Image (tube, rainbow, N blue to C red):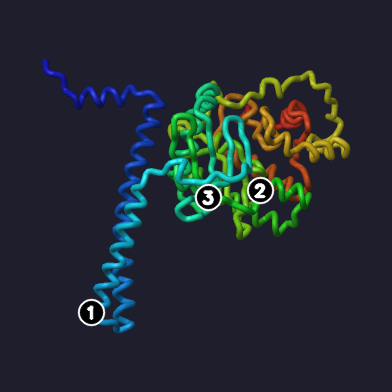
């Protein structure tokens, strides 16, 4: 009997792996965005032509001058579309100073040679991504930046690659991060904290609407633009949630808290509230917080208890992290902070039972 190719395709889809379904969903989103942008571009061009005709009629210019203005507009539109089709390469940018480093890449300022516009270039080494098993995380970061259109998150302009590196050309935010602000100010007023928390809520909500969880909400990922507005950045640990389960299982995940939850740290501070901290330890934590933020282990000060359980969690973990940041803005340090990550985990442990019984 002759095989039915449509039946074979349906069977392949039915037994496809989660990775295949994720790739199919990303391809679908890319195609939808492509045609949506194309149709929007047509509409914008028609509107610009009508606006030019209205202005010409109001100015009472002659028909010959109107035709000349319209031809000039068409030339500009054609040049703009040609530039859009141009394949972006690293040679199109002048690389400037390094402004940040990560586990397998760096972020540096760059200048577009054609326009002189300043961007932030995230440069990721492919071999490191493969050896550390981070390909899916980088893909999720790129998909989120391309999919979510919100003024509350950092904007992605271009993404391209060569044989060695993957490049993300993003919006440059010159206002610094919230961590630097807290290191300088120590505490913020209630009005200022309310403003930044409100904008953080909008940013987190914008990615949750697209079924992504950030998983790394902390002050150094909340960046200020030139006008002082806050934007969420660094989606290297973001992950799309499965709509069927709305949770993330931590098997084979990047978080490693086994060492951090060790009972052999010698800390015996349970005679005080779990969020209290001796003054000398607090001063040491404040001195070392920048180094702690970029260490291999990373900071656990903003990590939700359900993440430490290594069973599963949902979008709620981002709200826990934001609550810890709000506490720090008003008090001067996170509620469970320590210069030793094992002690931080022990301070959070009294709250784990809430998620065991829920």
Which label number is shown at residue 152?
A: none
Most foreground residue, 106 or 292: 106
Q: Residue 174 appears at what percent x and percent y?
A: 62, 53
Identity of the residue furthest to the top in this view = 1
Q: Label 3: few (<14), some or many (≥20) within 10 Å?
A: some
Residue identifier under label 2: 177
Q: Is residue 236 above or below residue 3?
A: below
Most foreground residue, 161 or 304: 161
**Secondary structure of the residue carrying numbered label 1:** helix
**Secondary structure of the residue carrying numbered label 2:** loop
- Mark 2 and 1 residues: CB-CB less than 8 Å, in contact? no
**Secondary structure of the residue carrying numbered label 3:** strand
Residue identifier under label 1: 63
Q: Label 2: few (<14), some or many (≥20) within 10 Å?
A: many
Closer to the N terminus: mark 1 or mark 3? 1
Separation (CA) of disc 3 from disc 2: 21 Å
């Amino acid at each position: 009997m002759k095989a039915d190719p449509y039946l074979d395709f349906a069977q392949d889809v039915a037994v496809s792996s989660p990775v295949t379904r994720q790739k199919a969903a990303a391809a679908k989103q890319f195609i939808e965005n492509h045609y949506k942008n194309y149709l929007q571009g047509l509409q914008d061009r028609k509107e610009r032509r009508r606006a030019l005709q209205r202005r010409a009629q109001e100015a009472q210019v002659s028909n010959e001058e109107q035709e000349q203005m319209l031809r000039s507009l068409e030339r500009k539109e054609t040049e703009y579309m040609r530039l859009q089709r141009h394949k972006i390469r690293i040679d199109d940018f002048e690389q400037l100073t390094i402004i940040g480093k990560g586990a397998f890449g760096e972020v540096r300022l760059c200048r577009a040679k054609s326009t002189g516009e300043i961007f932030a270039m995230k440069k990721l080494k492919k071999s490191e991504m493969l050896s550390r098993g981070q390909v899916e995380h980088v893909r999720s970061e790129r998909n989120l930046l391309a999919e979510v259109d919100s003024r509350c998150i950092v904007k992605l302009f271009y993404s391209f690659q060569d044989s060695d590196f993957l490049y993300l050309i993003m919006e440059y935010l010159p206002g610094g991060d919230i961590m630097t602000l807290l290191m300088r100010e120590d505490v913020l007023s209630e009005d200022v904290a309310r403003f930044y928390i409100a904008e953080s809520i909008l940013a987190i909500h914008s990615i949750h609407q697209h079924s992504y969880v950030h998983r790394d909400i902390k002050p150094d990922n909340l960046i200020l633009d030139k006008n002082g507005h806050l934007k969420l950045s660094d989606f290297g640990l973001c992950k799309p949630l499965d709509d069927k389960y709305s949770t993330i299982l931590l098997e084979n995940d990047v978080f490693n808290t086994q060492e951090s939850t060790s009972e052999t740290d010698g800390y015996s501070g349970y005679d005080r509230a779990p969020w209290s901290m001796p003054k000398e330890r607090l001063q040491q934590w404040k001195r070392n917080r920048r180094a702690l933020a970029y260490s291999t282990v990373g900071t656990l000060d903003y990590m939700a208890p359900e993440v430490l359980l290594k069973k599963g969690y949902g979008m709620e973990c981002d709200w826990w992290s934001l609550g810890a940041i709000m506490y720090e803005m008003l008090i001067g340090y996170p509620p469970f902070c320590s210069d030793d990550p094992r002690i931080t985990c022990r301070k959070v442990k009294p709250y784990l039972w809430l998620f065991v019984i829920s």
